[in-house]
Image: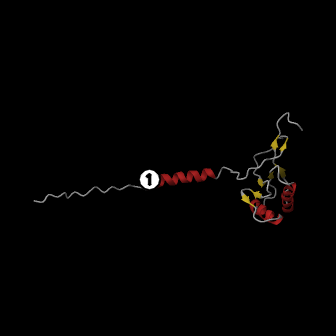
Amino acid sequence: MRISNDRRGDDFEINVIPLIDVLLTLLMFFVLTSTFIQHSRLQVTLPQASTQERDLNTQALTIMIDRDGRFYVGSDEVMGEGINALKQTIARNAGDNRDQPVIIRADAMTPNQNVVTAMDALGQLGFSRLSIATTPTKPGAAR
């Protein structure tokens, strides 16, 4: 007499659809929140100046210059040498809006020629609202 177990092992199924839904929701959350944070890839030491009240609500175009003389417009590095490459990158990032304010963030140790080159490129493109970013001096510091 043969006794056999005709019962097959239970087939386990893992339903991955809810897991995929949760992962996609988390992915969308992280992608959407990360685009609102402005990351600065470049660490610059700004020159010092006295503080003054100004309007911080307007969206400004930022040009960064590191101590080695490399230019960054917004978050894009300027590829190529000379004023023409800088002008092309500025025009691409600014579009047709020449009335927007432009902030030049130059490292304190960068040569003045780099700042003048950025100002010249902006002037040739028709920008007139330029400012140079500085760090505020501490009260009582030597002048």
Res 140 quadrant in image: top right
* Residue 47 at x, y percent in the picture: 83, 46
Count of numbered tags: 1
* Residue 79 at x, y percent in the picture: 75, 64
- Determine the secondary structure under disc 1: helix
In the depicted view, which residue is nearer to us: 79 or 51?
Answer: 79
Q: Is residue 53 placed above or below 26 in the rendered structure?
A: above
Extreme residue in the left direction: 1
User: 9 left or right of 64?
Assistant: left
User: 8 left or right of 3?
Assistant: right
Identified at 59% across, 53% down, the residue is: 31
* Residue 135 at x, y percent in the picture: 80, 43
- The image's colouring method is secondary structure
In the depicted view, which residue is nearer to us: 64 or 20?
Answer: 64
Q: Looking at the picture, which amino acid does disc 1 mark? A: Pro
Extreme residue in the right direction: 143
Which residue has dot 1 on it? 18
* Residue 9 at x, y percent in the picture: 26, 56
User: 61 left or right of 23?
Assistant: right
In the depicted view, which residue is nearer to us: 90 or 81?
Answer: 81
Q: Quadrant of the C terminus?
A: top right
Mark 1 nearby-residue class (10 Å; few <14, some 14–19, many ≥20)? few
Identified at 77% across, 66% down, the residue is: 80
Res 64 quadrant in image: bottom right
Q: Is residue 126 placed above or below 52 in the rendered structure?
A: below
In the depicted view, which residue is nearer to us: 49 or 29?
Answer: 49
Q: Quadrant of the N terminus?
A: bottom left
